[in-house]
Image: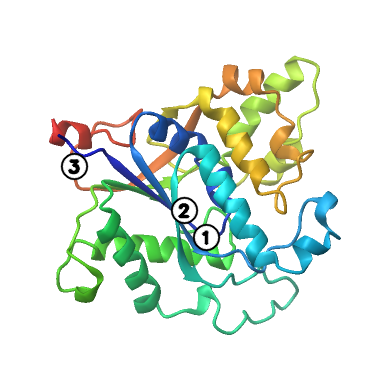
Amino acid sequence: MTEPLRLMAVHAHPDDESSKGAATMARYAAEGVRVRVVSCTGGERGDVLNPRLAHDPAVLDDMPEYRRREMEAAARALGVEHTWLGFVDSGLPEGDPLPPLPEGCFALQPLEVTVGALVKEIRSFRPQVMTTYNEEGGYPHPDHIMCHRVSVAAFEAAGDPDQFPDAGEPWVVDKLYYDVGFSPERFRAIGEAMHDRGLVSPFDDWVTARADRPARTVTTRVECAEFFERRDEALRAHATQIDPEGFFFMIPRDVERDVWPVEEWELARSRVQTELPEDDLFAGVRKVRS
């Protein structure tokens, strides 16, 4: 019997997996692909962004444990596996000048430590495809940028028997993708559709502020509209981080399904032949296995 395809999504914090590529993961999981989310940190330093929980003692007394339970619920909603890489959230520094990052946090860990930890997970799970963030981290959070660096280095190292020899048998990952979910094009298209229906878009200021930023190269669009509800359920599971009345939920789902029924990806590395543009993260991989 042929083993199922495997997809590994590497994220900085619990909740990132539910706001970046979640419907894609839910689709593949429903199709029988083994999908595993790796959270590099526990999100220990995340602020409570849901005003309903801002002063809840059950949350404030043990944020790490609360976020672990949220992650369990989100994984169930998406139908995916989950593991912790085991590093500590760096927090988002604010101020001018920026304060130093906390000692021992993920973003300050030596790469041989963080890359070695992820290589061990890759060799254990043996994915054909990995997803992560681009070199800017998607946005400039120190943990997101570190997640990119670690993911790319681990993608390259996992198949090399001379690197991290104690991390398990070498495994060559076929493809690496960057998430392109927060694209101005997506929010502009959805916003225009909302305006056409007489609705107010929550993204107008966001699109305007990013008008001069260069667009990422989208290579792959995965149809996943029927899994938007799963994505929303997973987002709501992260109750400390997601305001249920916030901008994530201000888009009417019928508008989103009509205008933008896909999630977008940028193919960053590939060891198999594939024709661009793609509509499948496993394009080329399925052909090799057939």
Q: CA distance from mark 1 to mark 2?
A: 9 Å
Which numbered marker is on residue 133? 2
Residue at the far bottom in the pictured view: 103
The amino acid type, in three-letter code, at marker 3 is Val
Give left or right: position of 220 versus 136. Answer: left
Which numbered marker is on residue 12? 1
The secondary structure type at the circle numbered 2 is loop
Q: Look at the image and tell me in which quarter the C terminus lies.
A: top left
Q: CA distance from mark 2 to mark 3?
A: 21 Å
Q: Residue at image x 58%, y 20%? A: 257
Residue 211 appears in view: no
Give left or right: position of 290 versus 217. Answer: left
Check contact, mark 1 vs mark 2: CB within 8 A. yes
For the residues carrying marks 1 and 2, which lies nearer the camera in this image? 1
The secondary structure type at the circle numbered 1 is loop
Q: Position of residue 48 (x, y in %)?
A: 76, 58
Check contact, mark 3 vs mark 1: CB within 8 A. no
Q: Position of residue 284 (x, y in %)?
A: 21, 35
Q: Residues within 10 Å of mark 2 (few under 14, many from 20)?
A: many
Q: Residue at image x 51%, y 79%? A: 108
Q: Residues within 10 Å of mark 1 (few under 14, many from 20)?
A: many
The secondary structure type at the circle numbered 3 is loop
Q: Earlier in the sequence, mark 1 or mark 2?
A: 1
Q: Position of residue 281 (x, y in %)?
A: 33, 36
The residue under label 3 is 272
Q: Is residue 31 above or below residue 138?
A: above
Q: Look at the image and tell me in which quarter the N terminus lies.
A: top left
Q: Position of residue 54 (x, y in %)?
A: 83, 58
Q: Give the image's coloring scheme.
A: rainbow
Q: Residue at image x 24%, y 63%? A: 158
Q: Earlier in the sequence, mark 2 or mark 3?
A: 2
Give left or right: position of 88 versus 148. Answer: right
